[in-house]
Amino acid sequence: MSNDQSDKDLYWQEGRIPASRQFEDIYYSPENGLEESRYVFLQGIGAPEAWRNRHRVSIGETGFGTGLNFLLSVHEWLQVAPADARLFYLSVEKYPLAPEDIRKALAPWPELCGELEELLAAYPEPIQGFHQRSLFGGRVTLLLLFGDACDMLDKVVPAPLDAWYLDGFAPRRNPDMWNERLFAALARLSGPGTRLATFTAAGFVRRGLEDAGFAMEKAPGFAGKRECLRGIFTGDSAQPERPYLVGEPWYNPPAPLPRSGHIAVVGAGIAGMMAGWHLTRAGYRVTVLDRQEAPMQEASGNPAAILDPFLSVDDGREGRFHRHALLHALQFYRNLPEGIFYACGLERRAASDKEQTRFNRIMETTPLPEHLLEQKEDGSLCFPTLGYLIPEKLCAFLNRDLDFRGGQQVETLEKRAGRWHLRDENDHTLIETDAVILATPSLIRKLPLTSHLPLEALSGQISLFRTPAAAPDHVITEEGYVVPSLVLQGRRVTVAGASFLPLADPDLMPAVTEREHDENRAKAAALLPQLAGADLLGGRSAIRYFSPNHLPYAGPVPDRDFYLQEYESLRHGPRHKPLPDARYHGGLYVLSALGARGFLTSPLLAAQLTGLICGNIPPLEQKISHALHPARFLIRELVKGR
Ligand SMILES: Cc1cc2nc3c(=O)[nH]c(=O)nc-3n(C[C@H](O)[C@H](O)[C@H](O)COP(=O)(O)OP(=O)(O)OC[C@H]3O[C@@H](n4cnc5c(N)ncnc54)[C@H](O)[C@@H]3O)c2cc1C
């Protein structure tokens, strides 16, 4: 997928109306696209009236096109929605238009200008997959799925939407999209009362939607068109309560947390701070607790953190997760105030011939465009838009609107009368709350409710050297890494990292050692020879935590006893009877095991967890969501025990 494809396909009728060569169809009505959108789609689902007193509105769309329906919906929703309301908008698009074409297509409607600029500033790369954007100060979440409508909708973690706009090219011109698979996918993402509107009145569309569970009716068409369709989901009689849940019930998402709920995040490292920031933006009251007096003092407290992506040759779950995390992090960090993220470029050199071969293969298969990833003549990989962050500055930004409480060492947690009680070592209650996010791996290992989540601890140390005269202007990585030059307490410092050592006792903070300084110096000098004799100015050590497959945990905490009992039959081969829905310790979540790339993955992980908590479709596809699910090792054990 690339803009080339859509550029070639797109042409302008009468120099102003965007149209597709492939589908021989226009993107919107030449009469008045805006009014058509308002009539067919917004009025078709009862909007904007239906949005007036709603605190949460969710819309799905097939065919993002120029973004006209999205922008008009946002425009109208902003006029009528309560100030603390949130809009979630999912849209699928197989052939994303280039931003400049969207701008040209929407030029006739200056009233949408503000919304358009906000969209274009965040518009994703035309790379197949999921792209979530948080717009209008977090009031609007846009989840764009670039790819085939059926393929993409089948991949999302199901959560019922309030309404559907079925747009896109006309059924007779685009028969691949309008089919039973699409109608079933819409039903999977609908609940009783979900409304639907479409410009077409094609008989097979109406019948297909009826078969999928929508009660359909015809309405007069816009501007001389004969008719259009409106519908309402009346449910699937097979699963009347949660018709959208199918597949592996042990991964079914828990019920969302009401917006009035309070959330305590334990651990103010990058995981907890990102979660706190995202949940506050989603409208929750959040308190972040940490045993340290200030946030981001342990693993997340280095003077610099590089954004060093994991790339894989295949397009497996791990590779897709990391690519998604990279694109999401780039979008997140580059919009922050100055002084937090330095996009100075990152060069990755191969540490061996084998790695060089891997780099070459990555370049053959990567969907990342050249402005994000290129290969130098010497074979190294270059990420011109990456670089490093200053965690202290990032922390100040994330902490701006958070209720942070330092010096709070949580030792136990207990649920009583539907509320979680977090206590210290003297059994004194630190906080009582509706939901808890554990973002502290050391505590997850200790608590009886979470100690079954496997976590491996590795210590690591960075070393700070006086910056040599001819320091490079970008980050270089190989076996180690160097961040060229920061100013710390008035001195120019080069950060070199990092060691990886198994830990005998993860409860003890590892000490800074000369041996690891020597190791860091040797690895850094291989990248920047002047560092061999540079003055050592200091160092820092901390613990990184990994899950056994090195993917993080992001999701609800399973009730282990329930899983072992109710899913016992997984030990005995294929299932013959339906198994019950997953059961969790309601309101308890983990966001942890961020390993060696917490700064790169935490923006996406926090968005994922926020989606799950507030009941939106989360930004990661279902397979990846399952790969991060805290129950995955429990299930694996059961299946392996066959
Ligand atoms: C040497 C080194 C270099 C690294 N370099 C990079 C890099 O360049 N780029 C990158 O992306 N990643 C890097 N990492 C990895 C990154 O630091 C981690 O992925 C990330 O910091 C993990 O964040 P966290 O929030 O899970 O953990 P932490 O930052 O450790 O946060 C956990 C928090 O929980 C608190 N806590 C613990 N127990 C309790 C309790 N009982 N009650 C209350 N609070 C508690 C702690 O005080 C701490 O603040 C590096 C790691 C190391 C060790």
Image (cartoon, grey):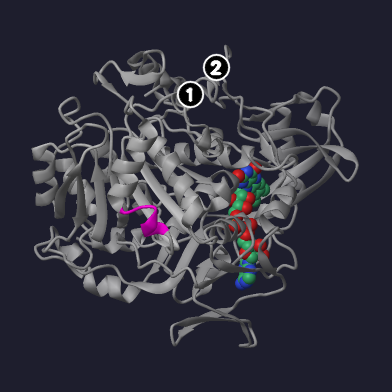
Is residue 49 a member of the stretch shown in magenta?
A: yes
Identify the residue at horizontal 59%, vertical 78% (top origin). 411
Please provide percent x and percent y for residue 350: 56, 25
Please provide percent x and percent y for residue 135: 53, 45
Q: Quadrant of ligand 1?
A: bottom right
Q: What SS does tag 1 mark?
A: helix
Toward the right, the furthest residue is 490
| Residue with the mark numbered 2 | 379
10 Å crowding of disc 1: few (<14), some (14-19), many (20+) = many
Residue flagged by tag 2: what amino acid is it? Gly
Q: What is the C-alpha distance between the residues marked 2 and 1?
A: 8 Å
Q: What SS does tag 2 mark?
A: loop
Range of the magenta residues? 46-51
Residue flagged by tag 1: what amino acid is it? Phe
Q: Would you identify the image quadrant in which residue 235 lies?
A: bottom left
Q: Would you identify the image quadrant in which residue 525 lies?
A: top right
**Please, is residue 28 above or below residue 205 in the view?**
above
**Please, is residue 248 above or below residue 185 in the view?**
below
Judge left or right: residue 34 versus residue 440.
left
Q: Tags 2 and 1 in contact by the CB under 8 Å rule?
A: yes
Residue 490 appears in the picture as rendered:
yes
| Residue with the mark numbered 1 | 359
